[in-house]
Image (spheres, helix red, strand yellow):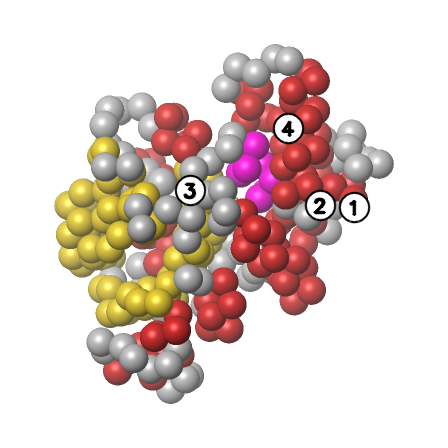
């Protein structure tokens, strides 16, 4: 399998102490990598580092290397090129205070696209991929902030897809939505992995089992385990704490 991301000896802190310590792993093209672990394990900080969202955090320090298609993601001060290649979906859905149409086309317009026909086609494609088109196609000019929580989360995914990212990060995307909507989004993600690489941080063990091709277990800033779901969820782990967490003994 081709490596999409290579993380080598990654350590980060925000000034007070280590958040991640010497984490090394590869993420393969067209896979879903699920990352599990209790709170304060460094999972969300790991995603932020991969997307250079940490550039804006005071006192942030990093050691190690992050490669995208074999090249450092820190190649230059400007990170806008990385935003176009990596999309991020945050835990709580955030609809921009504008229309549904403008939410989805905002990124492409900022990137210079002016062809209205192309923007309309792109908007519909992204909303369809996010399983939202049928619910909003008759109110595209309505305020996105009036959508339900589950609809706003899917709109966030559509917005992330609008720049055709090669990698999609999702951080606890189901934390504020109902189980039915969660299942819809999971079905979308399983289809999307045909076209991109997906990394999902989740505290829901059953979700990691359903979505992941592989699962990584993090604890206190360290990578305890990383293997195929078939092995991880059969108890074939390097560290017994991984199985203990999966079985609910702690966490």
| 57, 112: nearer the viewer | 112
Image point (68%, 48%), residue name: 131
Residue 196 visible in the snapshot: yes
Alpha carbons under labels 1 and 2: distance apart: 5 Å
Ranked by sequence position, the earlier of labels 4 and 3 is 4
For mark 4, give the secondary structure: helix
From the top left corner, tell me how far across and down residue 238 is, in percent: 22, 76
The residue that mark 4 highlights is 122
Q: Is residue 126 left or right of residue 243?
A: right
| 3, 182: nearer the viewer | 3
Give me the disc on residue 135: 1
Measured along the vertical axis of the image, is residue 134 above or below residue 246? above
Tell me the magenta residue range. 155-162
For disc 3, the neighbor class at 10 Å (few under 14, some 14 to 19, many from 20) is many
For mark 3, give the secondary structure: strand
Ranked by sequence position, the earlier of labels 4 and 2 is 4
From the top left corner, tell me how far across and down residue 251 is, in percent: 38, 77
From the top left corner, tell me how far across and down residue 13 is, in percent: 21, 51
Is residue 161 rendered magenta in the image? yes
């Amino acid at each position: 399998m081709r490596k999409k991301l290579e993380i080598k000896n990654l350590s980060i802190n925000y000034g007070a102490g280590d958040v991640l310590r010497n984490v090394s792993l590869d993420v393969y093209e067209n896979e879903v990598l699920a990352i599990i672990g209790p709170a304060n394990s460094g999972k969300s900080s790991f995603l932020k580092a991969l997307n250079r969202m940490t550039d804006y955090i005071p006192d942030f320090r990093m050691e190690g290397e992050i490669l995208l298609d074999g090249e450092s993601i820190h190649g230059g001060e400007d990170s806008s090129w990385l935003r176009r290649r990596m999309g991020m979906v945050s835990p709580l859905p955030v609809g921009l205070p504008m229309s549904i149409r403008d939410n989805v086309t905002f990124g492409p317009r900022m990137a210079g696209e002016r062809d209205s026909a192309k923007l309309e086609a792109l908007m519909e494609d992204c909303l369809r991929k996010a399983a939202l088109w049928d619910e909003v196609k008759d109110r595209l000019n309505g305020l996105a902030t009036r959508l339900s929580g589950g609809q706003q989360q899917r709109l966030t995914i559509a917005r992330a897809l609008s720049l055709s990212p090669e990698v999609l990060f999702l951080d606890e995307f189901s934390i504020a939505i109902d189980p039915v909507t969660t299942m819809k989004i999971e079905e979308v993600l399983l289809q999307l992995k045909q076209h991109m690489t997906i990394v999902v941080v989740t505290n829901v063990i059953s979700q990691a089992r359903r979505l992941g091709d592989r699962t990584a277990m993090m604890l206190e800033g360290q990578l305890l385990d990383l293997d195929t779901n078939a092995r991880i969820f059969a108890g074939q782990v390097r560290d017994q704490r991984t199985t203990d967490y999966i079985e609910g003994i702690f966490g």
